[in-house]
Structures are given as C-alpha cells and as structure tokens.
C-alpha cells in the first residue's frame, strides 16, 4: 500500500512539474524561453557551421529583442511561482488554480509568438543547408524529450 501511495505521489509530482515546464524551444531559443547564451549558442553555432558574421548577426538580433523578452520571462517566473503556491496550498482552490493557469498560459503564448518571430529572423540568416541541420537537430531533441517521459516514470516506479 505504501509503495502505491509513494508511486502515486511521485507521478502527481511529475505531472505538476511537467505541466509547469516551459514550452518547446524555437530556433536558437533556449528551453527557458530566453535566447541561447554561452555554451548553448557555441554548440549550435558549431553544429550548424555558422560563420563569424552569422554569429555576430544572430547575437545582434538577440540583443535587440532582449528589452521586450526579459520582462515577459520575469513575469512568467513570477506567475509560475504563484501557480505553484496555489497547487501546494493546504486547501485546493480550483477556480484560483484555473485562473492562475490561464495567466501562465497567456504569458507562454506571448513568449511563443516572440520566439517564433525571433526564430524567423535568425533563420533568414542561415543557408538552406543550415536550416535543414537546424530542423534535424530540433527533431533529434524532440525524440530525446519523447523518451525522457517514460524513463522518468519508470525511475519513479523504482524500475531501472
């Protein structure tokens, strides 16, 4: 019985965390919704074979978009924290959770549009071959994410 309760609690925690996880990333935008930085940018630049000029132009796009992007990310973090507080409250207020979830969803929608527009600008700087490499890379990342869910559930169930 204790194992069943533990498994259920772990699954519930996983679902809660997964539901609050950021949405998928667009071209050259990291999983937290912010433009790639540091080693992530370098890895992608290497993966796609970006020229020095392309790297400079892409960084300029990110810098130009940062003033619009950062407040949305900060707002998302704050609204997610408020949602998490409601989810973990001693009493469940379904209406409040739904209202807060709607706020989070609206910000995520704004960020998704922003990422799409930024990604479009970046893709204009890429060669057709680099765009294909980017699509292949994104498909590979999708496959990794698809595999992660079942592995996580098995691990929570105590399987190896």
Image (cartoon, helix red, strand yellow):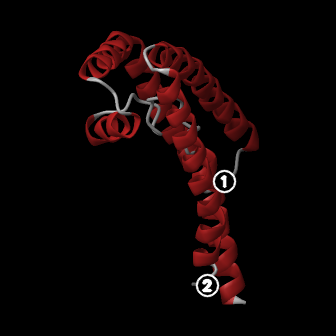
* Above or below, 97 relative to 121: below
Q: Residue at x 53, y 46 (%)?
A: 85
Q: Secondary structure at mark 1?
A: loop
* Above or below, 102 relative to 21: above
Residue 35 is situated, as x and y percent measured from the top left of the image, at 39, 28
In this orientation, does residue 88 appear?
Answer: no
Residues at circles 2 and 1 in contact by the CB criterion of under 8 Å? no
Q: In the displayed image of the protein, which residue is found farthest to the bottom?
A: 1
Q: Secondary structure at mark 2?
A: loop
- Residue pointed to by mark 2: 159
Crowding at mark 1 (Cα within 10 Å: few <14, some 14-19, many 20+): few
Please name which of the two marks, 2 or 1, marks the residue nearer to the observer: 2
* Above or below, 5 relative to 138: below
Task: Please give the label number shown on residue 91.
Answer: 1
Residue 15 horizontal side relative to residue 130, left or right: right
Q: Residue at x 71, y 83 (%)?
A: 4
Q: Quadrant of residue 74?
A: top left
* Above or below, 120 relative to 133: above
Residue 21 horizontal side relative to residue 95, left or right: left
Residue 88 is situated, as x and y percent measured from the top left of the image, at 58, 54
Residue 130 is situated, as x and y percent measured from the top left of the image, at 47, 28
Q: Residue at x 51, y 36 (%)?
A: 133
Crowding at mark 2 (Cα within 10 Å: few <14, some 14-19, many 20+): few
Residue 57 is situated, as x and y percent measured from the top left of the image, at 31, 14
For the C terminus, the image quarter is bottom right
Real-space Cα separation, disc 2 to disc 1, in angstroms: 33 Å
For the N terminus, the image quarter is bottom right
Foreground pick, 57 / 2: 57
Foreground pick, 81 / 126: 126
Residue 67 horizontal side relative to residue 146, left or right: left
In this orientation, does residue 6 appear?
Answer: yes
Q: Quadrant of residue 86?
A: top right
């Amino acid at each position: 019985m204790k194992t069943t309760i533990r498994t259920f609690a772990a699954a519930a925690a996983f679902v809660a965390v997964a539901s609050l996880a950021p949405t998928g990333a667009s071209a050259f935008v990291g999983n937290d919704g912010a433009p790639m930085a540091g080693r992530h940018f370098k890895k992608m630049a290497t993966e796609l074979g970006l020229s020095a000029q392309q790297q400079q132009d892409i960084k300029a796009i990110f810098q130009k978009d940062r003033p619009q992007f950062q407040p949305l990310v900060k707002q998302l973090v704050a609204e997610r924290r408020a949602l998490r507080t409601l989810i973990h409250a001693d009493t469940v207020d379904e209406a409040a959770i739904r209202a807060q979830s709607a706020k989070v969803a609206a910000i995520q929608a704004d960020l998704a549009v922003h990422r799409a527009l930024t990604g479009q600008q970046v893709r204009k700087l890429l060669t057709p071959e680099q765009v294909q490499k980017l699509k292949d890379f994104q498909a590979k990342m999708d496959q990794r994410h698809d595999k992660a869910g079942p592995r996580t559930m098995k691990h929570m169930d105590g399987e190896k």
